[in-house]
Image: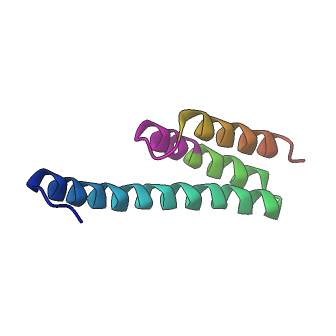
């Protein structure tokens, strides 16, 4: 357990940051899931709209440090490739 005042403060800060990051990660997963559901249903226009909403969310997560920049870029790329491949 933290003993010094600064260590106790860091514990509080880390706990707050963890909550925020958890919420952001959950939000990203929700947007990605919406795109995947639209792809599974076969509705190309809905998939494109969902991708358009998910893309800024993924890049925002990368900007905030929730995930690595390359990870979010890879996810956007793979999702857009799947949406583009739809009939």
**Relative to residue 22, is residue 10 drawn left or right?**
left
- Which residue is found at the position 15% from the left and 60% from the top? 3
Residue sitting nearer the eye, 58 or 40: 58
- Which residue is found at the position 40% from the left and 41% from the top? 64
The overriding secondary structure of the stretch rendered in magenta is: helix
Q: Is residue 59 above or below residue 41?
A: above
Q: Is residue 59 rendered magenta in the image?
A: yes
Q: Is residue 31 rendered magenta in the image?
A: no
**Relative to residue 65, is residue 1 drawn left or right?**
left
- Which residue is found at the position 42% from the left and 61% from the top? 23
Image location of residue 72, percent across then percent down: 59, 40
Residue sitting nearer the eye, 35 or 5: 5
Q: Which residues are magenta?
A: 55-67
Name the image quarter holding residue 39: bottom right
The colour scheme is rainbow
Q: How many marks?
A: 0
Image location of residue 84, percent across then percent down: 81, 40
Image location of residue 67, percent across then percent down: 51, 44
Q: Report the residue that reaches farthest toward the right.
A: 87
Name the image quarter holding residue 9: bottom left
Q: Report the residue that reaches farthest toward the left.
A: 5
Give the quarter of the figure containing the N terminus. bottom left
**Relative to residue 16, is residue 32 drawn left or right?**
right
Q: Is residue 15 above or below residue 68?
A: below
């Amino acid at each position: 357990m933290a003993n010094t005042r600064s260590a106790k403060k860091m514990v509080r800060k880390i706990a707050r940051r963890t909550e925020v990051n958890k919420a952001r990660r959950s939000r990203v997963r929700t947007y990605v899931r919406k795109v995947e559901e639209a792809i599974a249903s076969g509705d190309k226009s809905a998939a494109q709209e969902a991708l358009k909403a998910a893309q800024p969310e993924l890049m925002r997560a990368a900007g905030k440090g929730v995930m690595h920049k390359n990870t979010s870029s890879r996810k956007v790329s793979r999702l857009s490739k799947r949406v583009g491949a739809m009939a």
